[in-house]
Amino acid sequence: MLAVLAGGPGAAEAPFDAAAALRHVERLVAIGPRPAGSAAAARARRYLVDQLRGIGVKAQVQPFEADTPHGRLRMANVVAVLPGRRPDVILLGGHYDTKLFREFRFVGANDGGSSAALLLELTRALGARPREFTYWVVWFDGEEAFGAWTATDSLYGSRRMAEDLRRAGRLPRAVLVADMIGDRALGIRREAFSTPWLTDLVWATARRLGYGAHFSDETLPVEDDHAPFLRHGVPAALVIDFDYPPWHTAEDTLDRVSARSLETVGRILLEALPAIEERLARTPRGG
């Protein structure tokens, strides 16, 4: 693989373009609030598909319906498939919806915008480098709860995908989810439920690249789009900066998001993937 990937040439061949990622955030924010099931969410989805088409990647829009406190709503996950030399799948995910607030205008620059933008730029960079494993890059719909967070009112898109893949016997080998990673004051703690070896590889990469100050060994439990896959026995990890004062407020605006933070997380994930592939290549499924 390992010969090609161990030296890590991929990131050098297709560096993470932080300016492009920030432009994606800007354009998503310009759409306005994008709660799941809304017309604005559909516009955001079209933006994602158009951007993927522009870099030569075909997107699969996977629609589904979900029962919510606001009735049955139509939602859709967006999936970009990047074939590798083997069919085993590593899933990179994040959400593109924003939480619904009626009392103020919530544009979710960081919470929804940053993860969607990061994934677009990761797809472009990954598409230009050799891959041992196949990658699914997934923009989950309906991560946010419509009311108070519960097991049934949250994670609509990832719950649906994980269950569908389990039934089909097609669960990925590993899942990495990013959320709220554009904060100018980037500070990411280890997520307590995440698979330890996956978190270890990401954190070791952060230290090696000189970004260790942004990745703390303190732990914090956060339920996010990695959780449904963990429940099905898939190694999964979450990279999230939950120490974000504008979280779920009207102040989660474009000026709160930093291209440098997007680049930090993007570079780390791209550089960590060869080590993740190597670990999976020498570990049998379920091991």
Image (cartoon, helix red, strand yellow):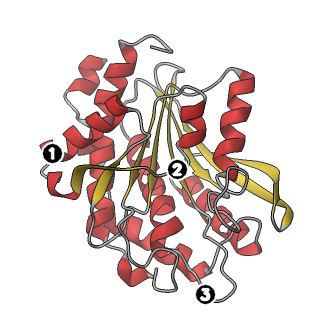
Label 1 vs label 2: CA separation?
A: 25 Å
Q: Residue at x 16, y 51 (%)?
A: 212
Amino acid at pointer 1: Arg
Residue sitting at x 40%, y 42%: 126
Disc 2 designates what residue?
223
The residue that disc 3 covers is 105
Vertical order, 167 against 245 (above or below): above
Asked if 180 appears above or below 224 in the picture, the reply is below
Which of the 4 image quadrants contains residue 263? bottom left
In-image side of 88 versus 79 (left or right): left
Question: What's the residue type where badge 2 is placed?
Answer: Glu
The mark nearer the N terminus, 1 or 2, is 1
Quadrant assignment for the N terminus: top left
1 vs 2, front mark:
2
Q: Amino acid at mark 3?
A: Arg
Decide: few, some or many residues near mark 3? Use Cα within 10 Å; few <14, some 14-19, many ≥20. some
Quadrant of the rendered structure where residue 148 is?
Answer: bottom right
The secondary structure type at the circle numbered 3 is loop
Provide the secondary structure element on which disc 1 rests.
helix
Rendered location of residue 161, percent (x, y): 68, 40
Residue 207 shows which numbered tag?
A: 1
Position of the C terminus, as image quadrant, is top left
Label 2 sits on a secondary structure element that is loop
Graded by Cα atoms within 10 Å as few (under 14), some (14 to 19) or many (20 or more), the crowding at tag 2 reads some
Task: Tell me which residue sits at (52%, 28%) in the image.
Answer: 234
* Residue ID at (55%, 73%): 28
